Amino acid sequence: MFRYAITRRPSRSLINGISQTPEKGKPDYERAMQQYDQYVALLRQCGLEVTVLEPNEE
C-alpha cells in the first residue's frame, strides 16, 4: 500500500492553460485551490503522509 504522496499546489497560470472545452471559459483559480485542498485532505484521511510542493509559476 502507499504511504506517501507528493503534490504541488496549483499555480495561478493554470487559468491560461489549453482547454478541450473553451466554450466553458477559463478555469477558476479559487475553485481549483478548494478542490486541491480537498484532495490533500482526502489523501491524509487515507493515512498518507503528504508532501506539498510550492506552485511552479513558469
Image: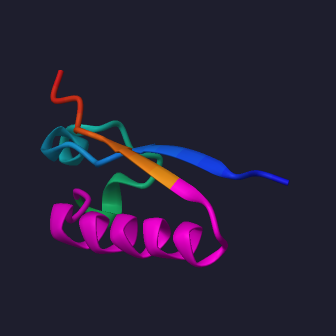
Q: Nearer the viewer, residue 19 or 43?
A: 43
Q: Which residues are magenta?
A: 26-49
Q: Nearer the viewer, residue 19 or 38?
A: 38
Residue 30 in the figure: left or right of residue 22? left
Residue 8 in the figure: left or right of residue 58? right
Q: Nearer the viewer, residue 5 or 12?
A: 5
- Residue in view at x 42 percent, y 76 percent: 38
| Magenta stretch secondary structure, dominant | helix
Q: Position of residue 41 (x, y in %)?
A: 45, 74
Q: Quadrant of residue 37?
A: bottom left
- Residue in view at x 14 percent, y 46 percent: 12
Q: Nearer the viewer, residue 22 or 4?
A: 4
- The furthest residue to the top: 58
By what rule are the colours in the image chosen? rainbow
- The furthest residue to the right: 1
Q: Position of residue 13 (x, y in %)?
A: 16, 39
Q: Position of residue 54 (x, y in %)?
A: 23, 38
Which quadrant of the rendered structure holds the C terminus?
A: top left
Residue 43 in the figure: left or right of residue 16? right
Q: Position of residue 10 (x, y in %)?
A: 28, 48
45 part of magenta stretch: yes
Which quadrant of the rendered structure holds the N terminus?
A: bottom right
Q: Quadrant of residue 31?
A: bottom left
8 part of magenta stretch: no
- Residue in view at x 23 percent, y 29 percent: 56
Residue 41 in the figure: left or right of residue 37? right
Numbered-mark total: 0
